[in-house]
Amino acid sequence: MRDPQVTRRRATSADVAREAGVSRATVSYVLNGNITQTIPEVTRAKVRAVAERLGYVVSAAGRALRTGRSKIVLMLVPDYPLPAAAEQGMRALTRFLEKRGLVLVIHHQTSAEGEASQRLWASIDPALVIVFDQMAGAPLDRLRQSGIDHIVTFTGRAGPEAQGLQIDESRIGRVQVEHLLACGRRRLAYAYSPDMRQRAFADLRLQGAREACHALSASELVTVVVPQDTSAAASVLRRLIADGLTGICAYDDDVALAVLAGAREAGISVPSTLAVVGVDDIPAAALAVPPLTTVAVDYTDIAEFVADGVASIVLGTPAPGMRDTGRIRLVPRATTCQA
């Protein structure tokens, strides 16, 4: 029978051990994810079930004191728009890290990060911090002052202060260009978002697009910013068409949809005059007029790659090798030749 005292105070590992009929050491091995001990799965399941019923949670601070190592991973989500599918990736990363005995804490940054964030970092004492882009200056100094040793970035452009996980964003740009060239489009433009905060990822995709143009002997890419305004986008597209451009690689589907809106306003036929490829395969892509060709990215696969990289740094497990992370694939629709 459950001890009524447990309902009036925070449950302890001793409470879990007593109700599960095991030792406190066994509780510790099971709830800390220790797989080096030979414990029957039925016992592990019983301990987890009792811990959940009692509301017992392993203390991160206490575990860090015992092991000398925190199991908390802090992700700093930037203050700019992320792909809708990135939310799926963050949920997957939470699961993958949990399987490796690590806990993910997600903090959405604001445009005025300061002492409040520094108090957060200090209070949870993360073993590692994930940032979306290279960090420098005051934000990096605040992390260092909080005693954080490991900082990783998604762009791979980590600089001397951090480690990059080397997600191959450039592959996205290569896929876009390869498809447009296969459709017979030889003069291409790369369309940026007007949001300068997204440039870190956009530049990596542009790099891959340029590499593909060079490898396939196409003309040098023109770069252009396409506003999220139909009339302004139409004005940009008229200039591109006047210069003989026949295809656009958009940074993402939102930019590509702005291109389509501008093309309709300017009377430019898609795809006969101008072919367009986006990125992310958001739900609106299939509903566009005409339906948008895009590049889909599996963020769950990226999450597993990131979890392996984080575990290698924090836990000393084998580091993941560089790979075509993200299962990047073309989704051909009516804004190109659909080849």
Image (cartoon, helix red, strand yellow):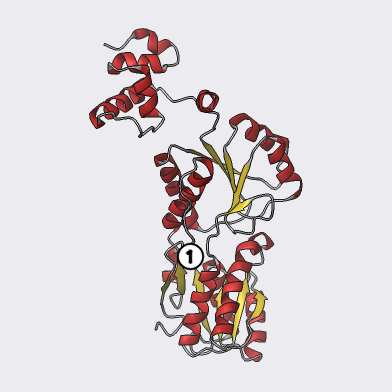
Q: Is residue 64 above or below residue 98?
A: above
- x, y percent for residue 48: 32, 27
Neighbor class of circle 1 (other Cα within 10 Å; few <14, some 14-19, many 20+) is many
Which quarter of the figure is the N terminus placed in?
A: top left
When asked about the image quadrant of residue 254, the answer is bottom right
- x, y percent for residue 79: 64, 51
Residue at 68% across, 55% down: 159
Is residue 82 found left or right of 143 in the rendered image? left
- x, y percent for residue 120: 63, 33
When asked about the image quadrant of residue 298, the answer is bottom left
Residue at 53% across, 60% down: 167
SS under mark 1: loop
Residue at 46% across, 70% down: 295
Give whichever of 23, 129 is nearer the camera: 23
When asked about the image quadrant of residue 283, the answer is bottom left
Residue marked by disc 1: 280
Which quarter of the figure is the C terminus placed in?
A: bottom left
Is residue 112 found left or right of 66 in the rendered image? right
- x, y percent for residue 197: 67, 59
Give whichever of 207, 3 is nearer the camera: 207
Q: Is residue 3 above or below residue 206?
A: above
Give whichever of 166, 138 is nearer the camera: 166
Specify the amino acid type for callout 1: Asp
Give whichever of 234, 169 is nearer the camera: 169
Total number of numbered labels?
Answer: 1
